[in-house]
Amino acid sequence: MNRLLAALVMIVSVFGVTAREITVMQFNVWQEGTSVEGGFEAMADEIAALSPDIVMLSEVRNYHGTRFCDRIVKALADRGVTYHSFYSYDTGLLSRTEITDSVTIFPCVDDHGSVYKLITEIDGNRVAAYTAHLDYLNDTYYEVRGYDGNSWKEMEPVTDVAELTRRNLLSRRDEGAQVIVADVALEKEKGSLIFLGGDLNEPSGLDWTEATAQTADHHGVVIDWPSVKILREGGLVDAYRAVYPDPVTHPGYTYPSSNPAVGVNRLSWAMKADERDRIDYLFYVPDSRLEIEAAWIAGPQDDIIKGERVATEWGQRDITPPLGIWPSDHRAVMARFRLK
């Protein structure tokens, strides 16, 4: 059902009034799909089938001097769907409507993350869409679980919140989040509808609560992780948590996904821990013209827990299974909005 809904970008009521729907997708494509045999074509199949209006991509590499933006746009055109894009590195953006401007917000330096923005127009409304892939180093949430956040070697778990926060801020993730918030403020002044999707390489404080303190090897830690907190305080709303506020009933894990085409040793960075987390997000800025209707996950249904594939129950509202080959070690995130 979610695939059908995502594909229907406009619904005409019995009275002939057009209600426009906007669907957005965040998709970490694991080095352009090259990490899975047939991954690039599978990635194109998934995007074409779901047909979101805007796609935020992580791990764009432009391998061998190619332009990923051109290759994915052509692959989607071959599947009967028209998208527009622009050259970028590390992250990417696709839009069903024409792009009127594109901006580098946070350039990728030494693989410490990137943020780009596109401007488009949907039904006469200026739309600003951001894609983010933040620093993968100093991943302190791994240190809670007994793995070094830079080398991923085993270590004693760190559970002191002040120390975790200090170590976490050694990354450039908070810098990326601050740059996003500053640019979002400018787009608010211009009256834009604003969306952000990204693999932030950091959990959310909405997931690390008292209710979840004894789950997924949190070791009793309750912490409001800094980068997502910066975005939240900057007026950005987590779409998945807006629809499913309870992290116990709807954990929404996006990493690691149990991709059956790949060995567990390539999917897990902490083989003795339960490293499941939600690190891929879709955000939006509340607007009187915009109403969120749905949010869900796309990808393999099973999880990896302590180096083992574990069957996980997901409600039909929560996850859309792959068409065939899944190209990533992450799950994708989808959200659908009604434009009033």
Image (tube, rainbow, N blue to C red):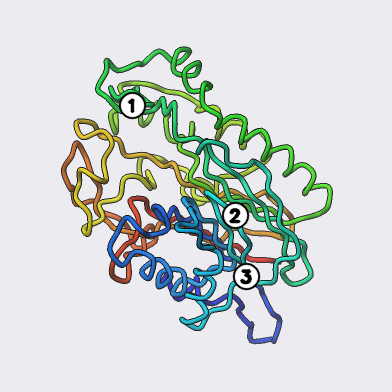
**Local SS, label 3:** loop
Q: Of marks 1 and 3, which one's residue comes earlier in the chain?
A: 3
- Report which quarter residue 323 is drawn in: bottom left
Q: Position of residue 302 (x, y in %)?
A: 24, 53
Please state which of the two labelled residues, at mark 2 or mark 3, is closer to the viewer. 2
The residue furthest left is 308
Q: Is residue 125 left or right of residue 104?
A: right
| Residue at the farthest front position | 65
Q: Residue at x 22, y 59 (%)?
A: 261
Closer to the camera, 199 or 211? 199
The residue at which mark 1 appears reads as 151
Q: Is residue 172 above or below residue 59?
A: above
Res. 307 in view: yes
* Marks 2/3: CA–CA distance: 13 Å
> Relative to residue 122, is residue 311 drawn left or right?
left
Q: Residues within 10 Å of mark 2 (few under 14, many from 20)?
A: many
Q: Quarter of the image containing the C terminus?
A: bottom right
CA gap between label 1 and label 2 equals: 28 Å
Numbered badge on residue 80:
none
Q: Amino acid at mark 3?
A: His
Expressed as whole percent of the image width and height from the top left, the position of residue 47 reads: 46, 69
Which residue type does callout 1 highlight? Ser
Considering the image in quadrants, where does the N terminus appear? bottom left
- At label 2, which amino acid type do we have? Ser
Q: In the image, what residue occupies the spot 50% across and 16% down?
A: 166
Residue under circle 2? 88
Classify 10 Å Cα crowding around label 1: few (below 14), some (14-19), many (20 and above).
few
Residue on which disc 3 sits: 84
